Image (spheres, rainbow, N blue to C red):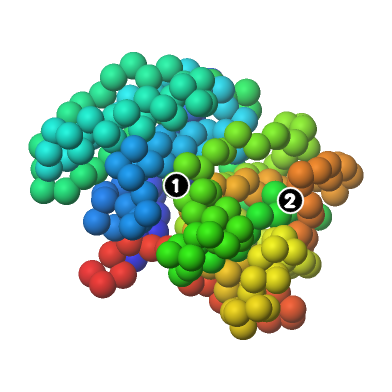
Amino acid sequence: MEKDFLRRLLQELGAEENDVVYIDDLIVKVDGSASTTSKLPFQTWKDFGWKNVASALSDLRVKFAEPLLMLVSVTAPFMDVAEEIIEGVKEAARRFSLRYVGGDLNEGIEAVVDVVMVGRAPAKIGRVPNPGDLLITIPHFGYTSIAYKFWPAAAHPTVKRGVEMLKRPEPIWPLPLLECVTASMDSSDGLADVLWTMAKGVDIVVTQLPTTDDVEAFAEDRQLDLEELVFNGGEEYLPVFAIGPNCEVEPPYVAFAEVRPGQGNVWWRDKPLPWRGWSYFRRG
């Protein structure tokens, strides 16, 4: 429902379906969330502020943009909550070398954080790859899925890593060569959501699960569905790049899918990949 509404709105506005807005050589991103739907039990208010900054930065960075400035609007029920959120925003700004120039402060029933980030874009990068491309990513999917379910057992190293990814995401991964990249997205609503979004007029064939031995061992030990953990998590803030077939894949990246001519399907093990990613307003 959420994505269908946004698609209709963009069509009315005559805007491109992308995770950012390009204006000449500038790139603009607005992102935010409300505490009732997005703050996890183990996150502090500082973590909540940090996460919203990281979320906006991830969308800029996956487009190779250089952030220039950031504005943040905070709504909170109490002043001490607002102060903690803003302290988390400031900590993230220092960590990521962002120019935090101000914003807005309001009182409301729940805490809401909205981040506007402006950057300089060296090129315009969309979300739809070309037939023959490879999809590459950093193979750390599955940790956040595990953390959602098992966070009270954070002493386990695999759970702990997932909790750390959710509390203080750090989208400062290395970038591939710009001239190799034909499309890109970051994974915030789940890898399956990314793949189905990128499969517009092409088919995407997943060739391997982009995860780690730790996640595989955890899933096997607890008899969990590994594919569900990898494809339908969320808030990984990991990049997915489409690159040309003649480009080399350098660590920490792995090629995990191929782009082929098609009708907009995503395939895994010769079957359509189920999608159960995050979406707001499902009960609306």
Q: Picture coordinates of residue 172 (x, y %)? A: 60, 34
Q: Residues within 10 Å of mark 2 (few under 14, many from 20)?
A: many
Which disc number belongs to residue 167?
Answer: 1
- Judge by depth and name the residue closer to the eye, 15 or 157: 157
Q: As drawn, is 43 to the left or to the right of 141?
A: left
Locate residue 177: give its quadrant. top right
Q: Picture coordinates of residue 215 (x, y %)? A: 66, 65
Picture layout, residue 143 above or below residue 170 = below
Q: Residues within 10 Å of mark 1 (few under 14, many from 20)?
A: some
- Which residue sits at x=36%, y=33%? 88
- Which residue sits at x=48%, y=65%? 153
Element marked by disc 2: strand
Residue 211, visible in the rendered structure = yes
Which of pointers 1 and 2 indicates the residue nearer the eye?
1
Q: Which three-letter amino acid code belongs to the residue tagged 1?
A: Lys
Picture layout, residue 283 above or below residue 248 = below
Q: Picture coordinates of residue 226 (x, y %)? A: 64, 74
- Judge by depth and name the residue closer to the eye, 20 or 230: 230
Q: Earlier in the sequence, mark 1 or mark 2?
A: 2
- Judge by depth and name the residue closer to the eye, 237 or 90: 90
Residue beneath label 2, please?
136
- Judge by depth and name the residue closer to the eye, 88 or 244: 88
Q: CA distance from mark 1 to mark 2?
A: 25 Å
- Which residue sits at x=26%, y=49%? 34
Q: As drawn, is 88 to the left or to the right of 63?
A: left
Q: Picture coordinates of residue 147 (x, y %)? A: 50, 62
Number of residue marks: 2
Quadrant position of the N terminus in the picture: bottom left
